[in-house]
Image: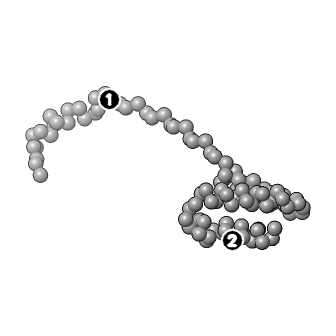
């Protein structure tokens, strides 16, 4: 069990290839392996903190999050704008660049 925990610890380090490659499926698999390892260990003193962090990791990494609801788009204002007579005002300058 100690060897398995050391292996998982190395694989889950922030500088590990797992994070550099951004492999979400492998990360989910390793979190599942940690969960199995913790469940197979007897819960003793100090394990409640381990269980708390494990539950947090499972919630953040493994569980699927619902897609956010699309926000309603504002109605498009198709009425006359304030510059409706813009062309008539500036036709006299008729500048072509």
Q: Quadrant of the N terminus?
A: bottom right
Give the colouring mode of the picture: one colour
Q: What secondary structure is found at the residue carrying circle 2?
A: helix
- Whether residue 63 sits left or right of residue 88 in the image: it is right
Q: Which mark is residue 55?
A: none
Which quarter of the figure has residue 88? top left
> Residue shown at 59%/57% (left/top)?
24
Query: Does residue 54 lie above or below 14 as drawn?
Result: above
* Disc 2 residue crowd, few under 14, some 14–19, many 20+, Cα 10 Å: few
Asked if disc 2 and disc 1 are in contact, CB closer than 8 Å, the reply is no
Q: Nearer the viewer, residue 46 or 20?
A: 20
> Residue shown at 48%/34% (left/top)?
72
Query: Does residue 79 lie above or below 35 as drawn?
Result: above
Query: Does residue 33 lie above or below 9 as drawn?
Result: above
In percent of width and height, residue 45 lies at 89, 63
Q: Which residue is mark 2?
A: 10
- Whether residue 92 sits left or right of residue 61 in the image: it is left
Q: Nearer the viewer, residue 46 or 25?
A: 25
Q: What secondary structure is found at the residue carrying circle 1?
A: loop
Q: Earlier in the sequence, mark 2 or mark 1?
A: 2
Q: Which residue is mark 1?
A: 78
* Disc 1 residue crowd, few under 14, some 14–19, many 20+, Cα 10 Å: few
> Residue shown at 9%/40% (left/top)?
92
In percent of width and height, residue 82 lies at 28, 33
Q: CA distance from mark 2 to mark 1?
A: 60 Å
How many numbered discs, if any? 2
In percent of width and height, residue 9 lies at 71, 69
In percent of width and height, residue 32 lies at 72, 56
Nearer to us: label 2 or label 1: 2
Q: Nearer the viewer, residue 41 or 52?
A: 41
């Amino acid at each position: 069990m100690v060897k398995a925990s050391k292996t998982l610890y190395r694989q889950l380090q922030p500088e590990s290839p797992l994070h550099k490659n951004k492999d979400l499926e492998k990360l989910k698999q390793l979190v599942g392996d940690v969960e199995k390892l913790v469940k197979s260990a007897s819960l003793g003193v100090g394990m409640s903190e381990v269980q708390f962090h494990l539950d947090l990791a499972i919630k953040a990494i493994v569980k699927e999050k619902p897609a956010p609801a699309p926000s309603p788009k504002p109605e498009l204002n198709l009425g006359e704008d304030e510059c409706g007579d813009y062309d008539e005002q500036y036709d006299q300058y008729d500048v072509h660049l």
